[in-house]
Image (cartoon, rainbow, N blue to C red):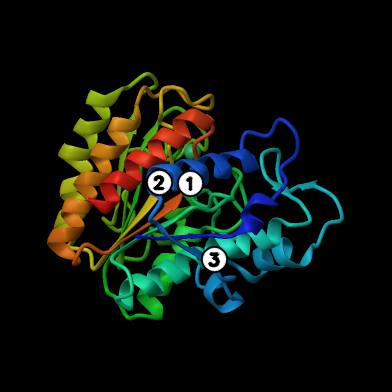
């Protein structure tokens, strides 16, 4: 099982007391190395401007890549650009592109990208919600435009709605976007009536919803939509902030729920797309929860 990461992802410096901190990624990497010592680790390349511009406006690329701050600056109240942030963002997005190349090129069946910053809040032209580039969208568009796929499913079980991913694809029927998320919660989107061209499926969950509600939403609403779409590639925005220990949200999930949803997605991928999955780390802000959840996710991805 192949994993992409890059040391630069640890150098994106959001400052003291920021939830989206380098220790998150260290916790994931350390836990994966301990539980799965035989993983095939690869260094993520940089995404090129040509790959990024499929998802993003030139103005956003300029803002993130060309600003070159000497110290931390705020792009918004949540989102920080530090001297190494552009490199981290390029490597995070590049991990997804390389993972897609590996899976579609037959070098790997499933790949996990252990990267930060996360990406699913970044829209076409705006970095927001800790996210600079929408790495999963860049990966999906690489699979569509570079490899010629016709149907890519992006599933998102991060506790926050992937507003950026939805906005990028809501008029692109080549992509199905399926998301469960807590509502109300940042960023405020993800209502059940946000359907795009019929290619957006949202399952908002109330605060304090737990395993039963989460699994029912996926089993009854989201997984059938993903299966019916018959994707040629399955991409996962893997956020673990729905865990009961997470400080940023109130869902009451645990690592076994992430194992379950991953197993369900593997079953769909095995049926429709030769098992091909690229999973990318999104949120998750409790280190212990991140460690056990990412291991459960990896266990199921490798099964
Ligand atoms: Zn999140």
Q: Position of residue 303 (x, y in %)?
A: 22, 50
Q: Are marks 3 and 1 in contact (CB under 8 Å)?
A: no
Side of 120 where 75 appears, left or right:
right
Residue projecting furthest to the right: 70
Residue that mark 1 sits on: 282
Which structural element holds mark 2? strand
**In the image, which is nearer the foreground, mark 3 or mark 2?**
3
Q: Position of residue 280 (x, y in %)?
A: 43, 54
Q: Is mark 1 within 8 Å of ligand 1?
A: yes
Q: Give the camera-side residue of 214 and 84.
A: 84
The correct choice, above or below, for 37 with respect to 143 in the image is: above
Q: Position of residue 284 (x, y in %)?
A: 49, 36
Residue that mark 2 sits on: 238
- Residue plotted at (63% across, 57% down): 7
Q: Are marks 2 and 1 in contact (CB under 8 Å)?
A: yes
Q: Quadrant of the N terminus?
A: bottom left
Which structural element holds mark 1? loop
Residue projecting furthest to the top: 208
Residue that mark 3 sits on: 43
């Amino acid at each position: 099982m192949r994993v992409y990461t890059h040391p630069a992802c640890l150098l994106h410096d959001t400052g003291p007391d920021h939830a989206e901190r380098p220790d998150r990624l260290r916790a994931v990497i350390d836990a994966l190395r301990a539980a799965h010592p035989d993983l095939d680790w690869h260094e993520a390349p940089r995404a090129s401007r040509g790959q990024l511009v499929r998802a993003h406006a030139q103005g956003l690329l300029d803002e993130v890549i060309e600003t070159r701050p000497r110290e931390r600056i705020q792009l918004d109240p949540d989102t920080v650009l530090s001297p190494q942030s552009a490199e981290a963002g390029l490597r995070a997005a590049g991990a997804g592109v390389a993972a897609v190349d590996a899976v579609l090129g037959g070098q790997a069946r499933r790949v996990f990208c252990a990267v930060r910053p996360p990406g699913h809040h970044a829209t076409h032209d705006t970095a927001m919600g800790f996210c600079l580039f929408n790495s999963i969208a860049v990966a999906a568009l690489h699979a569509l435009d570079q490899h010629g796929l016709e149907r890519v499913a992006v599933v998102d079980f991060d506790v926050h709605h992937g507003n950026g991913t939805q906005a990028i694809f809501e008029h692109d029927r080549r992509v199905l976007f399926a998301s469960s998320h807590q509502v109300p919660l940042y960023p405020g989107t993800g209502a059940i009536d946000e359907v795009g061209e019929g290619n957006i499926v949202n399952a908002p969950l109330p605060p304090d919803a737990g395993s039963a509600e989460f699994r029912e939403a996926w089993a009854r609403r989201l997984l059938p939509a993903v299966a019916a779409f018959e994707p040629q590639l399955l991409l996962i925005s893997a956020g673990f902030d729905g865990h009961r220990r997470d400080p940023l949200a109130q869902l009451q999930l645990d690592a076994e729920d992430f194992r379950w949803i991953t197993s369900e997605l593997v079953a769909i991928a095995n049926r429709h797309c030769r098992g091909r999955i690229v999973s990318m780390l999104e949120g998750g802000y409790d280190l212990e929860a991140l460690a056990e959840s990412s291991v459960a996710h990896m266990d199921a991805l490798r099964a």
